[in-house]
Amino acid sequence: DPNYALGYAGLADAYTLFSGFSDIPSRELMPKAKEAALRALSLDDGLAEAHAALGLILLLYDYDFAGAERESKRAIELNPNYATAHHFYSRLLSAQGSTKKRLPKSAARWRLTRSRSPSTGFTAMPCSTPENMMRVSRN
């Protein structure tokens, strides 16, 4: 269905995930991810999944931290129970630096995500904890 916003949001997430786990260069996949997220938002601006998807794309591909924060916060505002939005926001907080102020916020978001959806793909990986992400970034 060309008017199914949630489908486009899922497609955006799939392209984003695939860009990190395939041999296809991100420069080929991430524009498709962004296009799908923007299409989802054009169909339904109130869809948390689309805002979360765009937020992660802005973080990982565009390095637009302000835009990523705006989209992540909007996703959480629209659906506070959407665990993936909380996880993506925790990734943003971790990426913004290793300050003592940001790490506890990121860790709290990650724990909230795990408590709401323990088997969610990204959060089920031990390496995804903010503390482990910080250790990896120091090496």
Image (cartoon, rainbow, N blue to C red):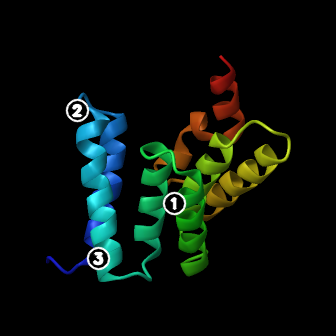
Q: Earlier in the sequence, mark 2 or mark 1?
A: 2
Say which quadrant the C terminus sits in.
Answer: top right
SS state under label 3? helix
Q: Which residue is mark 1?
A: 84
> Do we see residue 74 in this rendering?
yes
SS state under label 1? helix
> Do we see residue 83 in this rendering?
no
- 118 relative to 45, above or below: above
Task: Residue at 51%, 48% (x, y): give it.
Answer: 59
The label shown at residue 53 is: none
- 96 relative to 53, above or below: above
Q: Which residue is mark 3?
A: 5
Q: Amino acid at mark 2?
A: Ile
Q: Amino acid at mark 1?
A: Thr
Q: Earlier in the sequence, mark 3 or mark 2?
A: 3
| Nearest-to-viewer mark from 3 and 1 | 3
Residue closest to the far left: 1
- 66 relative to 127, above or below: below
The label shown at residue 24 is: 2
